[in-house]
Image (tube, rainbow, N blue to C red):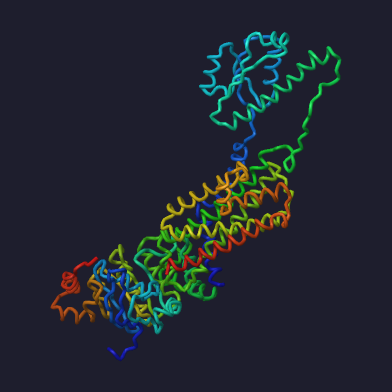
Amino acid sequence: MSERETIITVNHLVKKFSSFIANNDLNFEVYKGEIFGFLGANGAGKTTAIKILCGLSKPTSGEATIAGFDVYTQKDDIKNSIGYMSQKFSLYEDLTVTENIRFFAGIYGMTRKDIKIKTQQLLAKLELEDSAKKLIKDLPLGWRQKLAFSIAIVHSPKIVFLDEPTGGVDPITRRQFWNQIYEAAAEGVTVFVTTHYMDEAEYCDRVSIMVDGRIAALDTPQKLKETFEADSMNEVFIKLARNATYNE
Amino acid sequence: MRTILFILQKEFLQIRRNRAMLPIIFVMPIIQLLIMVNAATLEMKNISICVVDNDLSTTSRQLTNKFSSSPFFKVTGNTFDMNEARTQIEENKAQMVMNIPAGFEKRLVRENKAEVQMLFNAINGTVAGIGNAYANQIMMGYNREVIAKWIGISKNMPKTKSIETIPSFWYNPDMNYKIYMVPAILVILVTIMGMLLASMNIVREKEMGTIEQINVTPIKKIHFVIGKLVPFYIIALFMLSFGLTIGKLVFNVPFVGNLGLLFAVACVYLLVVQGIGLFISNSANTQQQALFVSYFFMIVFIMMSGIFTPTESMPQWAQIINYFNPIAYFMKLIRMILLKGSEFHDIYKDFMILLGYGVAMITLAVVRYRKVSN
């Protein structure tokens, strides 16, 4: 595995908020094109870590490079190379499907001509042609999430960060959503995903589990189950998270 | 630059879709101008007066007639009982009482001197004061007639000696309060658009959570801020033109000065209020907070701006505060330009202060904005 190309490297990353240590000495690597699951209970420090990796927040100490760019000094380069979709729904509800696509593609520097072509492709793929002129707020949640994901990768980023992308979505749509993720990964996009659904953890190539600001385990779902003598990722997670001492 | 165009396109689409926006742009100027200009007047007409005439003589009737024929007074009651007159004031049916005692005419003829009592409801001191001034004018006029009639004619004097003042009212010769108020309302409209709505629009992105998505894109903060402020800048200038048109068509406000200069002042003024609006949106997390904070500043600024009362007659400390009150500057300049025809060299100093203020506010707000969201 280690001979594979790494795209995210994190070394001794620490983030403190006054006395509270949100991320305590994180070390991991993410390989190009893999689906990397980032698990942890609420408050374990996942969001803080993602914010640092996306260039939204500065680490207290340690190193991290995203797509070869440094999180301290090359934030703008990082932002150009990543896509992001948050747990909070983040498209503009008062804009139509096409207008959202155009806006986000536009601010990533795509030309109007490319945007038109890409819009047609996206609409066809998502079977949203009839809803192209509908406002986002008039779309069902599942469709919105699928569209949000497509828009997060509209500018063909190297990495896409998904922060609990399937919250509140029905199982069928979740399944479709994961098909989208597989497709993106097959095209070489690295997927960094956090989730609360343990069945989704099984879909990941590798999974890290955070407990109390530390990475308690990191391996393929298969190996993790073997190590912790568990039948499912659910069991693995509970065994690890049970020892958590919330030091808030 | 291209990024800004995409942001602007998005902002204008959202503003157009916002159902409250079109009414605000078109209906608010009309309503505010038509209602507030007509209502917010210090010109006093129809002061209601209750007459207690216990003399019932020719003289007392003539005096009463003087009042009822004046446009400033309206005789709303006639009684012989002072207690009833007092009740009328207490019940707000009359604002003043004129008490002509019995024997008024007799005394005037025999003693060359007679007294009339005037009572005013002075809860609103201004109304009472102005009413008193009007009443005195009528009294003096009537006095002269009486003198002319009884003394002048008998002694065959052509005219009594008196010093007459001949007032000439510059810049607003008809003393039309409305053309004084129209520019003031325009100032308020521009301020609401530039400060309140712009700040609420930025905070809206925080509230919706879309700001998070914007933050992970390569959009520079300055581009985002420009994209947010420019639409309201344009709309505010449009509202000013629209309001000026209404002012001209409905109130026939004279445009004595240069409209180009007026718009130059408005452009500079908008920098200041947008800077303040941006500052507010930095610290507010919800539209409600932004609204309350903007509202607070706007009320204080408007009340102190000289909208109704001249800033020059405010106490010293208030005048010092007004150095930092952008609305006071614009309020003064728009009236100077529109009504007085002031040229650039007349307003040079205020214009430069406003410009410096605007550049400083925008710069400060943008710098602070970057820090906050990083």
Mark yes or no: residue A138 visible. no
Residue ID at (56%, 68%)? B5
* Residue placed most toward the observer, A215 or B54: B54
Q: Is residue B133 above or below residue B176?
A: above
- Is residue B7 placed above or below B116 in the rendered structure? below
Is the N terminus of chain B in the top left, top right, bottom left or bottom right quadrant? bottom right
Looking at the picture, tell me which residue is in the foreground, B127 or B114: B114
Left or right placement of residue B309 versus residue B341 in this view: left
User: Which residue occupies 59% across, 56% down?
Assistant: B235
The residue closer to the viewer here, B154 or A98, is B154
Q: How many numbered discs sit on the rendered protein?
A: 0
Residue A25: x and y in percent read 27, 78
When asked about the image quadrant of residue A44, the answer is bottom left
Asked whether, in this view, residue B371 is left or right of residue B175, the answer is: left
Q: Is residue A91 above or below residue B160?
A: below
Percent across and percent down for residue B101 are: 62, 12
Q: Position of residue B50 (x, y in %)?
A: 60, 18
Answer with the quarter of the image where residue B307 lies: top right
Q: Is residue B170 left or right of residue B122?
A: right
Q: Position of residue A193 (x, y in %)?
A: 31, 74
